[in-house]
């Protein structure tokens, strides 16, 4: 199994373009970027992938020990960069992948040109004066939600493959598999995501960074986005009119414009 | 009245019926803006949640009615699914009611788009799932219990399995030994294959490989019995045939089981730096000898199964070994590995081992890989491959390393 197969890496856009890598967050897969990524193909070499255990990645590569912390996922990002010999990478991470990108950029600062963090949170759980937005009890409840929705998942769905990416609508295959993953892996990923604390890592980021912040984001509130901006030396924050946690789906135009303004700068 | 048109009275009655159905449907209905703000709810949902309609409409988002965990699920799964597919079905969530009570619900939503393709409205049906959730919780508990119990069973099997084989092979000067043991299936079944190496004198070693019929705990008991019987018989007897006869008698006498086994014992003896092998096969596939790049030859005469006959035919065959010789002892899990109707077979085995004679370990590892690949990764039977290579051994070398 190659790294490209393991992470279901998909490459599009200009072959000689600067690499622009999109990473999806907890819950779904690379299709989260399907309305945003194509807008960059005329100028960039666009790289999409699924985290191991999500989407159409090779779930057999899921190793609870390797992925016990976000560092395991960051190592995968670097694996992909090495495998494809990507240099001067612009990394766009949504949700938990923001912190995965932060960890990758700290590990190999020379490889990354810019970081775009969409709805980032370095810690979801409140801690003293820090307001992450959730209590530990809330996260336990989330894990309960995942278990209750276990019955909506069956192993028969797992191997479903995405059809033709040129097709405008989504294939029935994707309808069946999108946002559904092996409950044990989802449970593990949720625990790692929502229990992690990456606040100390932010100060170590040297890469120029943009925080893309939504209005009324129930998962990553504005104050958390501002915390990230303040903690990363070379960073700025752009506020979207879009609400919710997934502007890449609900407001792809605005999201793409914010990313483009930063990467074209 | 034009044909096909209804009278105003009929239309009004139909509209009233529709409104009544909406308000008093046997499930809750709510509609929200694409951002989630509630624009209408029916009476059923108001009653289920304990809120008045005017406390919800225009004031609350659907997500704000959920538990914090449910809100995260909503943002990370539900909303993306709706945006992407236009529909989300059978999502289990908990609504926090006006009195703080949690109401388990199952939710279906559709996203309505306007003629311009923009999201316009989300329509959601909410079903009270209190009893169903209770049942599902029981199912989940049962599943967790079953998983924990399987975990314990695996642990037990692993522990037991380690008692059926020695923890490591001894270093014997002049010999290169290696073994691979791959239990059948995915590792929680304990099987009937065993092997052992014991020293019976200076430069005098006994290597046994066997296979007890069947699998599971009962087979494992017999496997342990066979291994220890060989071990203790070897203290008094030197002949492999006599040791296997002794095992035959013990198995026949044991009334708790009618299981039998196959086994091969090889006694390796060093005298004046030359090794000789005495081989006895009790119903077991004969060991293979590789010498001077010639194709593999079978060692020893065929003998009877152990634990079946009162006076089994068992023969000791003695041969001199040369440096560079390789002996491979294996169990039938190797040759009977199946791909469809086809067996791995002795032909493939002799081909494979002939290509990997650099070291005993390489031979075992490479052969195991081929056997597993042949049957798609998960073996149906235990596999043991035991390889012995005779190294160049000058007379000045020490004869034996103590264990």
Image: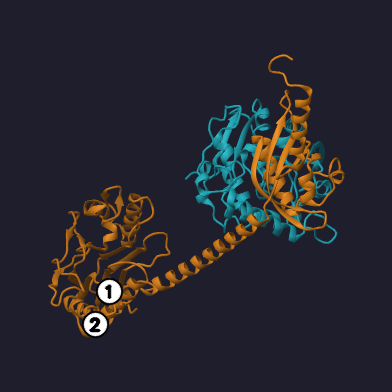
Secondary structure under badge 2?
helix
Percent coordinates x, y for residue A32 in the rendering: 65, 38
Q: Is residue A75 above or below residue B30?
A: below
Q: What is the quadrant of residue A15 in the picture?
A: top right
Percent coordinates x, y for residue B377 in the rendering: 38, 53
Q: Is residue A224 above or below residue A18?
A: below
User: What colour denotes chain B?
Assistant: orange
Identify the residue shown where x is 24% and y is 82%: B233
Is the image coloured rainbow, by chain, by secondary structure, or in one colour? by chain
Q: Earlier in the sequence, mark 2 or mark 1?
A: 2
- Chain under disc 2: B
Percent coordinates x, y for residue A139 in the rendering: 71, 57
Looking at the image, can residue A71 be seen? Answer: no
Q: Nearer the viewer, residue B282 or B257?
A: B257
Please report contact status of discs 2 and 1: CB closer than 8 Å, yes or no.
no
Q: Which mark is residue B233?
A: 2
Callout count: 2
Q: Are marks 2 and 1 on the same chain?
A: yes
Q: Nearer the viewer, residue A145 or A53?
A: A145
- Figure quadrant of the N terminus of chain B: top right
| Residue furthest top in the image | B2
Residue hosting label 1: B397
Residue B246 in the figure: left or right of residue A146: left
Q: Is residue B290 above or below residue B235?
A: above
Q: Which chain is cyan?
A: A
Secondary structure under badge 1?
loop
Identify the residue shown where x is 34% and y is 61%: B361
Residue B29 in the figure: left or right of residue A183: right
């Amino acid at each position: 199994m190659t790294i490209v197969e393991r992470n279901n890496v998909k490459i599009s856009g200009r072959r000689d373009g600067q690499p622009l890598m999109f990473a999806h967050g907890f819950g779904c897969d690379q299709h989260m970027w399907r309305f945003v990524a194509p807008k960059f193909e005329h100028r960039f070499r666009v790289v999409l992938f699924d985290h191991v255990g999500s989407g159409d990645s090779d779930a057999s590569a899921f190793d609870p020990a390797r992925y016990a912390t976000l560092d395991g996922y960051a190592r995968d990002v670097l694996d992909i960069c090495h495998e494809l010999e990507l240099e001067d990478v612009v990394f766009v991470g949504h949700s938990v992948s923001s912190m995965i990108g932060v960890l990758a950029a700290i590990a190999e600062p020379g490889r990354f040109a810019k970081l775009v963090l969409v709805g980032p949170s370095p810690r979801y759980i409140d801690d003293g004066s820090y307001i992450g937005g959730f209590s530990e009890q809330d996260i336990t409840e989330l894990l309960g939600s995942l278990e209750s929705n276990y019955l909506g998942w069956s192993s028969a769905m797992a191997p479903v493959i995405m059809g033709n990416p040129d097709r405008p609508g989504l294939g029935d295959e994707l309808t069946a598999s999108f946002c559904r993953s092996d409950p044990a892996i989802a449970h593990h990923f949720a625990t790692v995501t929502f229990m992690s604390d990456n606040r100390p890592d932010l100060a170590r980021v040297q890469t120029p960074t943009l925080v893309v912040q939504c209005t009324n984001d129930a998962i990553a509130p504005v104050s958390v986005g501002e915390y990230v901006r303040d903690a990363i030396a070379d960073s700025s924050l752009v506020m979207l009119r879009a609400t919710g946690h997934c502007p890449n789906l609900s407001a792809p135009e605005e999201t793409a414009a914010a990313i483009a303004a930063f990467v074209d700068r | 009245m034009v044909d096909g048109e209804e009278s105003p009275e009929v239309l009004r009655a139909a509209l009233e019926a529709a409104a009544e159905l909406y308000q008093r449907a046997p499930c809750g209905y709510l509609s929200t803006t694409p951002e989630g703000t509630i624009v209408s709810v029916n009476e059923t949902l108001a009653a289920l949640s304990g809120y008045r309609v005017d406390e919800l409409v225009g004031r609350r988002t659907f997500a704000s009615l959920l538990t914090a965990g449910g809100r995260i699920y909503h943002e990370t799964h539900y909303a993306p699914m709706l945006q992407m597919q236009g529909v989300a079905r059978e999502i289990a969530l908990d609504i926090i009611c006006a009195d703080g009570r949690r109401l388990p619900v199952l939710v279906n939503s559709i996203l309505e788009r306007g003629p311009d393709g923009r999201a316009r409205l989300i329509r959601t049906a909410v079903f009270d799932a209190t009893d169903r959730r209770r049942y599902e919780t029981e199912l989940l508990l049962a599943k967790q219990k079953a998983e924990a119990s399987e975990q314990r069973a695996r642990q037990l099997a692993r522990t037991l399995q380690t008692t059926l084989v020695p923890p490591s092979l001894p270093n014997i000067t002049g010999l290169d030994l290696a073994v691979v043991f791959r239990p059948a299936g995915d590792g929680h079944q304990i099987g009937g294959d065993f092997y052992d190496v014991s020293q019976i004198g200076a430069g005098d070693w006994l290597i046994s490989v066997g296979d007890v019929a069947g699998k599971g705990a009962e087979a494992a008991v017999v496997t342990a019995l066979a291994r220890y019987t060989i071990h203790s018989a070897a203290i008094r007897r030197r002949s492999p045939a006599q040791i296997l006869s002794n095992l035959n008698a013990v198995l026949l006498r044991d009334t708790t089981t009618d299981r039998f086994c196959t086994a091969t014992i090889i006694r390796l003896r060093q005298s004046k730096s030359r090794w000789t092998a005495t081989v006895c096969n009790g119903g077991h596939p004969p060991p293979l000898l590789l010498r001077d790049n010639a194709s593999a030859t079978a060692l020893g005469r065929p003998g009877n199964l152990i634990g079946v006959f009162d006076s089994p035919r068992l023969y000791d065959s003695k041969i001199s070994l040369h440096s560079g010789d390789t002996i491979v002892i294996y169990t039938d899990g190797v040759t009977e590995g199946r791909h469809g109707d086809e067996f791995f077979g002795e032909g493939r085995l002799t081909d494979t081992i002939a290509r990997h004679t650099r070291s005993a370990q390489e031979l075992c590892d490479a052969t195991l890989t081929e056997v597993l690949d042949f049957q798609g990764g998960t073996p149906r039977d235990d596999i043991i491959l035991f390889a012995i290579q005779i190294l160049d051994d000058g007379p000045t070398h020490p004869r034996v390393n103590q264990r």
